[in-house]
């Protein structure tokens, strides 16, 4: 069977299960007795095993099978969860991650059997349950299926309890003169997909007649909660041999046995069974009345809620190559598209009719209507593209847990705002910068438990990640309550490297000194570690975030901690922009960056350190002459009044001098690819209504 068409779904689903497993194992480390979590881990491992088996990824399937074995023992109360088990489980997840990465890149899981991890799982299992390594124990004795067949079919059907509906179906089939066959089918004990085999048998026999009763029920079979055999009653007019032959033709079916039955025999058997059960119940009630009832063992009591809660624990949706979309968002989108078609039809009909001013007025009305719909449609599409940043940040608690052990520091990660939504393309690329900032906080931000104790701080360091929306931006703050950034050391390093002179260093603000950390290869690390170095890679963090149209700032207080603030645009595809003109060329500036627009006279321009500035409402704002930066021809005659667009990035302001304003417009950003890869000044281009191309200026780079 060609399963390559299902690869995307497999990758997406596996990502979800692995994240769910990671979250559950983190919970289990803190609450080893939590039966809901234990049950959820068993279910996720079981699902992964089935999926890997279906796709033919044997190594992945074996590893998850052994994980499932361990949790079967934990569920039944024969084993306890220890920190050693949790460590091995995390090793299993890392191994499964590597398999998944290989599958993404090559459609194959690779050749690593992870024998050492599997052996560790088996050793834990053997030690925990007092049995031999389960590899041998799990394999069925050769004669097991033969023994079952020797029991014969007769013992099977007597155990089936019929509902009223099933009784009616059996009776009706008999009245129609059909044969009723009771069939028991035995599946090979090495089979990985019992349910799939059972349903293939059902499909085959349904071509010969109607299945009247399933035993166990079809739902139980679908959930794979049955042994390696199942029974059913078939109403048909073909001979029994034909039914058995068709059943056995399905692969991995070892045997099918059966017999013809009469409804009255079945009814008599069930009545007899009910009578026996009634007698047994009565005897038990009398015994209970005459003596105190023994308490239920604790582990048995714990098993009960597991079954009840099994269906409540749904794994969280995780995005990969696909986006899971709320149906209401799609309904809204569909509605806008239908409105758009109506508007188009109206314009076509106006174009077809002849008329004077009336036609002209109708035409303008329809254009306005079309404008409203397209804006609304754009908003709907944007909402569909938006996904919560949860898909990126949910892997961080596990990372901090591993770092805590690796660095031998006590630390806790606190996250808020995981449901904050960002454009899909931004979410995909923000993971690495955030991961680096968190590693930075863990490695260089937080002090060791001894140092924290001396300073009177709690031994457990706090790292936090907060996300929230602010206007057209999403803000993500990554901070810690560690030592903070030593600006004197940063300044000394900058002087040592010849970036600034000691005199310049004296005049610099704390913020300007901290900004040195974002310079390429400016490292403050005493020694290079494989975790991070404050400064190693911060330039990469900055360039990655700026590539997404965002920016990053740092605030730090010595001895109290640091906070990195990442500001990102909500979306990258369509933005509101101010169109400006510079020497007959049109340019766009994102409205999100613009604070105000001022008309100033040339007399108001002052000079600070030979740079042009203006003083407005208590702020000294440097001026940027865009015509010079864009290398335009100088004007023959300087006008006395200048139009200045005031832009802001974080705490910084600048005034962009333009020749003229055209107005606000919604623009679609088109990438220029590698044509102007070197220039960060231009963040893309847009096509205007008349077909002209306008470049989009990046205000962040200008600042």
Image: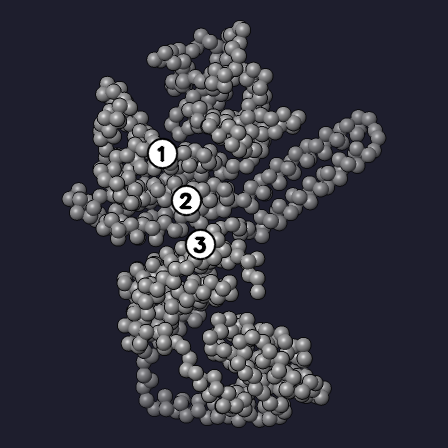
Name the image quarter holding the N terminus.
Answer: bottom right
Q: Is 323 positioned to the left or the right of 624 in the image? A: right
Instruction: Report how far apart the C-alphas of labels 1 and 2 lie in the structure.
Output: 16 Å
Q: Which of the 4 quarters of the picture holds residue 294?
A: bottom left
Disc 1 versus disc 3: nearer the observer: 3
Closest to the observer, 85 or 243: 243
Residue positioned 29% across, 24% down in the render: 499
**Crowdedness near tag 3: few (<14), some (14–19) or many (≥20) residues, C-alpha within 10 Å:** some
Task: Mark 1 or mark 3: name the one nearer the start of the chain.
Answer: 3
Pick out the residue farthest to the left.
454
Q: Secondary structure at mark 1?
A: helix
Which numbered marker is on residue 517? none
The Cα–Cα distance between marks 2 and 3, rounded to whole angstroms, is: 20 Å
Q: Which residue is depicted at the point 67% across and 87% down?
A: 239
* Callout 3 secondary element: helix
Residue located beneath label 2 in the image: 431
Which percent across, then down, holds residue 570?
A: 49, 38
Q: What residue do we see at 38% from left, 42% from top?
A: 434
Q: CA distance from mark 1 to mark 3?
A: 30 Å
Rendered image: mark on residue 539: 1
Q: Which residue is mark 3?
A: 102
Q: In the structure shown, which secondary structural element does the residue marked by tag 2 occupy?
A: helix
Color style of the picture: one colour
Camera-side mark, 1 or 2: 1
> Are the residues tagged 1 and 2 within 8 Å (C-beta)?
no
């Amino acid at each position: 069977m060609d399963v390559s068409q299902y690869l995307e779904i497999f990758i997406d689903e596996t990502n979800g299960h692995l994240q769910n497993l990671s979250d559950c194992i983190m919970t289990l480390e803190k609450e080893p007795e939590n039966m809901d979590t234990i049950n959820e881990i068993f279910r996720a491992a079981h699902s992964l095993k089935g999926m890997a088996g279906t796709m033919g990824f044997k190594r992945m399937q074996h590893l998850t099978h052994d994980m499932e074995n361990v949790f079967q023992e934990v569920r039944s109360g024969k084993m306890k969860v220890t920190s050693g088990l949790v460590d091995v489980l995390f090793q299993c997840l890392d191994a499964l991650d590597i398999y998944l990465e290989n599958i993404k890149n090559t459609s194959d899981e690779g050749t690593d059997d992870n024998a050492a991890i599997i052996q560790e799982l088996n050793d834990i299992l053997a030690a925990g349950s007092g049995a031999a390594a389960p590899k041998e124990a799990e394999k069925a004795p050769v004669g097991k299926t033969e023994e079952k067949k020797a029991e014969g079919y007769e013992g099977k059907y007597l155990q089936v309890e019929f509902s009223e509906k099933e009784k009616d179906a059996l009776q009706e089939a008999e009245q129609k003169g059909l044969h009723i066959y009771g069939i028991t089918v035995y599946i090979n004990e090495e089979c990985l997909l019992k349910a799939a085999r059972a349903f293939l048998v059902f499909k085959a026999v349904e071509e010969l007649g109607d299945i009247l009763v399933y035993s166990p029920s079809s739902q139980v079979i679908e959930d794979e909660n049955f042994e390696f055999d199942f029974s059913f009653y078939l109403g048909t007019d073909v001979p029994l041999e034909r039914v058995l032959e068709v059943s056995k033709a399905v692969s991995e079916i070892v045997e099918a046995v059966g017999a013809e039955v009469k409804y009255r025999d079945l009814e008599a058997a069930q009545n007899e069974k009910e009578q026996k059960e009634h007698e047994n119940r009565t005897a038990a009630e009398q015994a209970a009345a005459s003596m105190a009832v023994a308490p239920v063992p604790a582990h048995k009591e714990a098993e009960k809620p597991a079954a009840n809660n099994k269906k409540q624990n749904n794994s969280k949706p995780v995005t990969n190559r696909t986006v899971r979309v709320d149906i209401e968002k799609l309904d809204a989108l569909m509605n806008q598209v239908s409105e758009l078609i109506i508007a188009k039809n109206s314009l076509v009909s106006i174009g077809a009719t002849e008329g004077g001013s009336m036609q002209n007025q109708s035409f303008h009305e329809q254009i306005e209507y079309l404008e409203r719909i397209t804006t609304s449609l754009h908003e709907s599409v944007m909402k569909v593209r938006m996904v919560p940043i949860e898909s990126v940040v949910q892997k961080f608690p596990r990372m901090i847990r591993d770092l805590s052990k690796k660095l031998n520091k006590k630390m806790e990660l606190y996250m808020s705002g995981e449901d904050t939504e960002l454009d899909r393309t931004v979410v995909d690329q923000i993971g690495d910068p955030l991961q680096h900032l968190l590693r930075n906080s863990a490695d260089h931000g937080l002090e060791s438990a001894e140092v924290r104790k001396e300073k009177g701080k709690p031994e457990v360091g706090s790292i936090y990640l907060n996300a929230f929306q602010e206007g057209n931006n999403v803000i993500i703050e990554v901070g810690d309550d560690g030592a903070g950034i030593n600006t004197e050391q940063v300044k000394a390093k900058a002087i040592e490297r010849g970036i600034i002179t000691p005199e310049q260093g004296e005049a610099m603000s704390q913020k300007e000194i901290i900004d040195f950390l974002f310079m390429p290869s400016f490292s403050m690390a005493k020694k290079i570690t494989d975790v991070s170095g404050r400064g190693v890679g911060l330039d990469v963090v900055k360039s990655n975030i700026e590539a997404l149209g965002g920016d990053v700032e740092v605030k730090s207080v010595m001895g109290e901690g640091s906070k990195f603030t990442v500001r990102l645009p909500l979306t990258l595809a369509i933005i509101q922009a101010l169109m400006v003109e510079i020497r007959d060329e049109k340019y766009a500036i994102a409205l999100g960056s613009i604070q105000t627009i001022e008309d100033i006279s040339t007399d108001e321009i002052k000079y600070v350190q030979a740079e042009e500035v203006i003083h407005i409402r208590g702020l000294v704002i440097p001026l940027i002459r865009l015509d010079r930066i864009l290398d335009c021809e100088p004007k023959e005659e300087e006008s006395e009044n200048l139009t200045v667009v005031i832009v802001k990035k974080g705490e910084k302001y600048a005034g962009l001098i333009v020749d003229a304003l055209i107005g606000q417009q919604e623009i679609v950003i088109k990438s220029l690819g590698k044509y102007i890869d070197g220039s960060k000044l231009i963040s893309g281009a847009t096509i205007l209504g008349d077909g002209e191309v306008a470049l989009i200026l990046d205000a962040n780079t200008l600042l």
